[in-house]
Every structure is written in structure tokens, then in C-alpha cells.
Amino acid sequence: MKGEWKTALLLSVLSGAAALGHQLLWTRRMIDLLGAGAESTSRVFGVFFLGLALGSAAALVLSGRARRPWLWLAAAEIAIAALAAPIYFLPWWSSGIWPALGPEGLTSAWGGLVKLGLSIVLVLPPAFVMGWFLPFAAKGLLRGERSLDRHGVSLYGWNTLGGVAGLALVVMVFLPLLGAGGAAAAVVSLNVLTALGCWWLDRAGTPFPGQNHAEPTPSAPRLANTRTTRNPWLWGLAFLSGFGILALEVIALQMLMLVAPLSFHAPAGILVCVILLLALAAFATRRLTSLTAPANLLAPILAATGVLAAVTPLLFYTVAMATGGLPPAPNLTLFGLRLALFVVVTCGALFLAAGLLFPALTAWSGGEDGGGRRWGGLLAINGLGGLAGAEAAHGILLPWAGPFGAAWVVGGLYAGLGIALAFFPADSGAGNSPARAGRVTGAALGAAALWLLLGTPVRNLSPVNPHMNVTVLETLSGREGVLSVVERADFGRGLLVYNQYMLGTTSARHDQERQAHLPLLLHPNPERVAFIGLATGITPGAALLHREVGEITAVELSAQVAGASRDWFAVENQGLFDDPRARVVIEDGRTFMAASRDQFDVVAGDLFLPWGPGEARLYSREHFAAVRNSLRPGGLFCQWLALYQLRPEDLEVILRTFQEVFPETWLFVNTFRPDSPALAMVGFRDGQLDWETVERRTAAERENRLLRDPVTRHRSGIELLHLGRAPDMGPGPIHTLTNLWIELAASRERITGEPSAKYLSGQRWLDWSAPLLARPPEAGGPA
């Protein structure tokens, strides 16, 4: 029996690790298919949680009929691996979906339905089977002297701790060493190991009697009764626990990303820390329930969580201002430790308190049906609450109140229910003496009063770092993060993302306009053009100055960015949103290009952050191939690179990847300043760079008298920007959706060491480009 228990706990850890590892990899793989937009991410996340909840609900019935629960779990783990296969093999079968739908279908209601359908078909089945583990494991374990109120809480804690291990393994080990495909195989191996362990337990154990419902053995304690199972507090608080945890997790992630470097690793590290705190809370509950009845813990947990949700924004703000946030560390391990310490100091108490609620409810529900059938219902309700909480945070609380105010609002929900529970106890038979009832009521009222007092200072906090000395014109918060429109004398007006990165400023207007002028002047008749990335709208707006352009499509991932561009930069972007020649499409650039076969004469890609979560997909071989297919005969693709964000090895990988699709690649710059160079990779669907075309186009623009940039009004100016053909990069790594080479490498560099000391700016850029400029001129080309 003791060996069975230890083995089951190990299997609980393995199952949790596989579940969270799959969830991370599924989300990334589905984003490859559906696009990196916030709606796509939320859709996949929601379907995953819905699958878990439905699976737990199904286990409520199935586990009661199972005579061999460990054999069921062995089959379930193998089923998870099999059902996940279509997700991991997406590149082999999904390439025709978006071309068949077309750009109009992709951006219509049909496109949304197709994405929802794909999410349900691919993610729901394996997530549904994942939801079986805890109820079936409870059926296999919780008999004899084991009961849900004691051993079930431990099982839950170890399963949660396994999720921490799974996330850490995928982020720190599997993806860097094995790539996305190898990481998938490694996580599937965890399912196989769990299945083998469950099969061994089935072989070593004794089947249950053949009754329809599991009955406790005579020695099993009956710590719960029908009155408890029908108590509305049990089910309502199970829903609240999921709702509050996921809402607070979404809010805390947005709050912490105000200081954590934008990268792949930072949000994953934050999630690891939060789930670890929830696991520790489960183990703490076991100790607390040995001191008092679980029902007695509920009101104090709710009151404490309410106060801590209001305190956390103030604590975060104070610590962030005192420490300067989370600067890069010498190595990934040290950065992880700093991040963990920051999360624990600022949010640790909140998630420990909130994490106590569901384990306490598990303990309160007791051990009446040692198999844990009721637990399946609690897990299902908790999962549905989590889905509702995440959606409420993304869609209502964050847009309305921002990250600081949203935390305070969720705290109010906890505090209010704490008061209600103090006045209307969940279990009047749990030792609720008049004196104790008075203390609990007084504490709950005091917590609510403290929550109210903290409301004004919390709501007055600004998500923009005051040390930046900017005037904040507007701040937007929601699924897509925190975006602020700010103004300062030295850079004019700009879009600030998460306190960290300017999407564009009015002071750099002419450089941004040149990113449109250059590719348009290389094409003989750029009638239909597309821009991937909008930002302030200055770059696509510059295309309106070219009379040959008849239709402009600007593809932008973020509705927040598009709204700010429309409201605050209309003058600088030439009234892009009101011009009949232009349309702004809210869609992922990669999926839109994949759907747009033979559509455009010119496609220009903006300056994408190589270390931004999901953005490096736009430097992948798959994306470059989709853009090539979107071009008309003679069309060209111009992808801009912010060299001051790339190391030489990153640039070489991107160039090599681009040359896989466009063997003839020409290089241009858009500025002569070596401190912030931007490089253009230009490739044609067919044909060559023609300087006579440049001569005719620049002459036509001088006649039109709309272009004021002296460099782009003359062929000689374009020649000054020209660096020649891209050198052959030779054999070496390329960036694909399977290996995520650029995203992982750039993200790791972003959070370790001194990345600015390695990026291609200043003397490093001059040294890299010197061999290009030293080459003899090509026949018919510029000197």
C-alpha cells in the first residue's frame, strides 16, 4: 500500500508535467496555424480549459463504473499522446487551409468560425482526456484509510507541482536543445512513462468489485455527508476559486510584464512561479486542515485574498521603483532566480492565499466516496470558473480598470464573499461557537474596510514608469497587453509597449516613411501593396504619396495599436484610415499572407522584434515562402531588420533563411546613421533589380511633387542606400517554425548579459558592412 501511494504520487507529477508541457507546446503550435493574435491565444487557452472541465465532469460518471481505474488511466495517457499528434504534425497537413479560404474569408466571420472549429477539433479531445487523471487516480487510491480530505489534497498538490516541472523542462531544456519537434516528442514520452506506471499499478493491485458506484470500505472514514455535497457554498466557491485564480494570473502577468523584459522566457518564467505558489498552497492546506475543520478556513481565506489582491499593486509598484525592475542577468539561471524572487516578493502572498481555497474545498468535501467521484464535479466546476475568470479579466476588467485596478476589483469579489460566508457559515456544525463567529465576522468586515481604503491609491497608479518623464496621453490595456500613447520633447509622440519598447515616434517619421518609399520605387508599377505591421501607420501611410499605388492593405496584429494609430497619428500617417485606397486588417501577418496568393505587387515587412513573443515567426522560412506566393508576377518583398536588435549570428541566420526562398537577395539601408541602422532584404518573385526602373520611378515621383524625401526622389539617392547583393551565407542553421531558432536565441540574449554590446550598431555594423561596400560594382549597377 505504501509503495502504491509513492508510485501514484510520482505518476501524478509525471501527468501534471505532461499536461502543462503539452499546453505550452499546443498553444505555440496552434498559434503557428491560427496566428499570434490575442484572440487566437485566448481561443486555444479557453478550449484547453473547457476540455479539462468537460473531462473532469465525464470522469464523475466514468470513474464510478471503472473496476480497474489504473488501466483506464494507462489508456488515457496513450490516448492523449495519440490525440495530440495532429497538433504536432500541423505543418504536414494544414498548409492548404488559408489559401483555400482566401484573405476575404480569413478576415470575415467565416475565418473566425474556422479558427474556432480548428481549436475545438484539435485541442478539445486530448484536453478532455487529460481531465480524467485526478478523478480516476482518486478512485484507484482513496480507499481503506485514505480519503479525499487528506490524501486527495496531497495528490492535487503533487499534480500541480508536476505542472511546474513540465513548464520548466519545456522552456529551459526541451525547446533549446531539441526544438519544437523534439520537445513534443519529449513531452509525449512523459505520457508513455505515466501510462507504463499506471499499467504496473493496475497489474499490482486488486480490481474493484463490479458495482456501478464505488462504495467505501468499512474502514474508510466518512468525513462528509449528503448535506455537505449539496451545500451551495461548496460548488459556488469551487467556481470562484477557478475564476479568481485565472483572473489574478492574467492580471499579474500583465502587471509583471511592465518590468520583465519582453521575451519568450519572461512570461513562461512568471507562469512557472505562479503555479509553484499554487502547489505550495495545496501542501500548506494539508497542514491547516489538521489544525481546524476545513469549513472554518473558508472565510479567512477569502478575506485574506481580498486584502492581498488590493495590496499587491502597491507592493509591486514600490518594489519595482526601488529595484529598477528586472534588468538582464549574466546568465539564464540567474535571471530565473531574480524573476522568481521578484514574483514571490510582489505576488507570492496573494497566490498562496488564493491557492488555499480549492484544496480547502477538496478537504471539506471529505471522503464519503473514497473513489473521489464528487471530486470530478468539483474539478469540472473549478475549470469552468477558470475559463470564465480568464475571459472576464481579458475582456472586461483589464480594458476597464487596467492591471492595478483589475486586481483591486477581483479582491473585492473575494472580500465580499468573505463577509457573506462570515454571516452565513458554510457548515454550522464545524465548531462555529458564538465567540468564533464574532471573530470571523469582525475580521471579514475589517478586511473589507481595508480593501475599500486601498481603492483610491491603487486606482491612481500609472502603468507608465514615471522615470521616463513622458506625458501619458492614453493607456490601453487588454488581451494584447499594455499600450500607452506618450509624448516627450525629444521624440515627439509615440506608442509605448509595456514600458519597454517604442513602436514608432513622430521624430523618426522620415525614416519610417522611407521604409515604404524604397520598395515602391524598385517596382515598375506598384498598384497593389501590402504592409505587414502598422504601428503608428506612418510607413503604410507614406504609400499614399505614390500616385501609382491604387490599393494599400496594412495588416496589424493588435486592435489596440490600430486604434491608437487612428486616433493619435492621423496627420503623420496621411489619414490612412480615411483614405478610400487603404484598408487596415486586424489579423496575423503570417496567416494573412498565407491566404493571399497572387495578390500584391509589393509586400513590405516592418521592423519586428526578434525577441518578442511570437514575432520571430515573421522571420521564418514558412512565412517568407507564404509572402513569395502572395506576390504577383514581377512582385517584390522587402523585409526590414532592426540591426540594433540583432547579433551578427542572428542576422546571418535570417539572411540564410531569406535566401532559401529568394536566392537573389539585395540589401539596402534606410539611414546613414550607424547607431540605429535598419537593413532591407529585397527579393523578387521572378526577375531582377532593374536600375532603369528606379530611374523612371524616381523621375515620376519628382513630377508628382508629393515625395519630399530628397534621398528617395533621385536614383542617386537610392544608390546611396544600396549595399549590393547579399553575400552567400553558406551552410548553417535556418529559422523555421519547428526549431524557433531566432526567437529562442534572441530571447535568451535579451535577458542575459549585455545584449546592446553585441547588437549590430555603431562600429560593429560598420565592420560587418565594410566588405559589402568594398566589392567592385556590378555591371549596370551603381558605383
Image: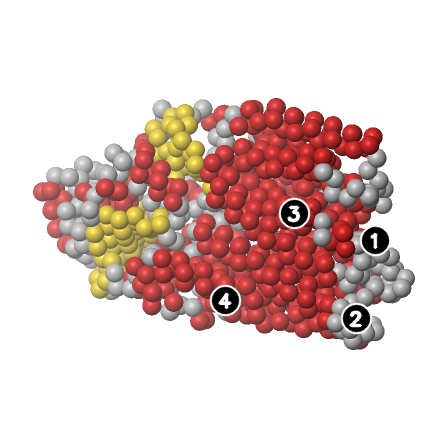
Q: Which residue is mark 3?
A: 236
Upstream in the sequence, badge 1 or badge 4? 4
Upstream in the sequence, badge 4 or badge 3? 4
Instruction: Name the residue type under label 1.
Output: Leu
Q: Which numbered mark, 2 or 3, is in the foreground of this view?
A: 3
> Around disc 2, counting alpha carbons within 10 Å, would you say few (fewer than 14), some (14 to 19), or many (20 or more)?
many
Q: Which residue is mark 2?
A: 201
Residue 60 screen position, x and y as percent: 68, 63
Q: CA distance from mark 3 to mark 1?
A: 20 Å
Q: Quadrant of the N terminus?
A: bottom right
Upstream in the sequence, badge 3 or badge 1? 1
Q: Which residue is mark 4?
A: 121
- Taking depth in this image into account, of 461 and 144 the one nearest to the observer is 144
Determine whether 432 is above or below 154 in the image: above
Q: Which residue is mark 1?
A: 223
- Name the residue: 40% across, 31% down: 474
Q: Which numbered mark, 4 or 3, is in the foreground of this view?
A: 3
> Around disc 1, counting alpha carbons within 10 Å, would you say few (fewer than 14), some (14 to 19), or many (20 or more)?
some
